[in-house]
Image (spheres, helix red, strand yellow):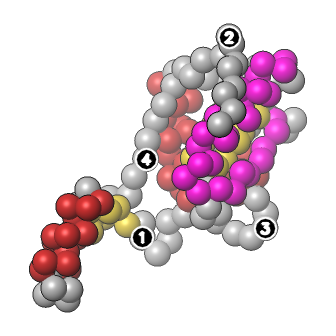
Amino acid sequence: MSHMVLKNISVTGIACAVPVKIEKNRDFIGLVPEDEVIKFIETTGVESKYLISEKQTTSDLCFVAAEKIIKEKNVDRESIDALILITQNPDYIEPATSHVLHKRLGLKKDCMALDINLGCSGYVYGLYFAAAMLQAGSVKKVLFLAG
C-alpha cells in the first residue's frame, strides 16, 4: 500500500446535510422474516437509512452543506479556486454535477469544477487530489463535497 504525505494542508470546515425521511430496517419485519432483519442489523450495524424525496438530488444535499460551510466559516466565494465533487450518484449524465453546483453556489467564473465518480474510496481519493492541487500551488482554496 502506498503512503502519501502532504504537508501544510488543512481541512478548515466540515458540514453535513441529510434528507429528512428515515426508513428503519425493523419496519421490514413482516415483509422479510424477523430473524433475517435482525441478522442484517447485527452484521451490518445499519438500523436505518435516510431517503431523499423524488425531487431531491445529490447536488441539493451538497448545496445545503456547502452553503453552511460558506456561511459559518465566512468564506468569500471569490476565494474558492476549485470545487471537487465526489459522487457515484450524479444528478445527470451531463452536465457534470459539479458544474451545476458551481453555478448554483455563485462561484467565480474561473473556479475549477470537476466530478470524481467513485464510491466509498472516492472520499480518500478526492481529499488527496484536493490536497495535491493545494500543495502544487495551483489553487489556494478548494470546496470539497461528497454526496
Sooner in the amino-acid sequence: mark 1 or mark 3: 1
Residue 47 position, x and y percent, is 22, 61
| Badge 2 element | loop
Looking at the picture, which amino acid does disc 2 mark?
A: Asn
- Residue, disc 4: 17
Looking at the picture, which amino acid does disc 4 mark?
A: Ala
Q: Please tell me whether mark 2 or mark 4 is closer to you in this view.
A: 2
| Badge 4 element | loop
**Mark 3 neighbour density, 10 Å: few (under 14) some (14–19) many (20 or more):** few
Farthest residue to the top: give it: 8
Which stretch is magenta?
111-137
Vertical side of 104 occupied by 25: above or below: below
Residue 88 position, x and y percent, is 62, 61
Q: Are marks 3 and 4 in contact (CB under 8 Å)?
A: no
- Between the residue at mark 4 and the residue at mark 1, the CA separation in whole angstroms equals 14 Å
Tell whether 16 sits left or right of 37: right
Q: Is residue 79 visible?
A: no
Q: Please tell me whether mark 2 or mark 1 is closer to you in this view.
A: 2
- Between the residue at mark 3 and the residue at mark 2, the CA separation in whole angstroms equals 35 Å
The dot on residue 53 is: 1
- Residue, disc 2: 8
Residue visible at 47% across and 25% down?
72
Q: Are marks 3 and 2 in contact (CB under 8 Å)?
A: no
The dot on residue 94 is: 3
Residue 85 position, x and y percent, is 66, 47
Looking at the picture, which amino acid does disc 1 mark?
A: Ser
Q: Is residue 97 visible?
A: yes
Q: Along the line of sight, which residue is nearer the eye, 32 or 48?
A: 32
Give the quarter of the figure containing the N terminus.
top right
**Mark 4 neighbour density, 10 Å: few (under 14) some (14–19) many (20 or more):** some
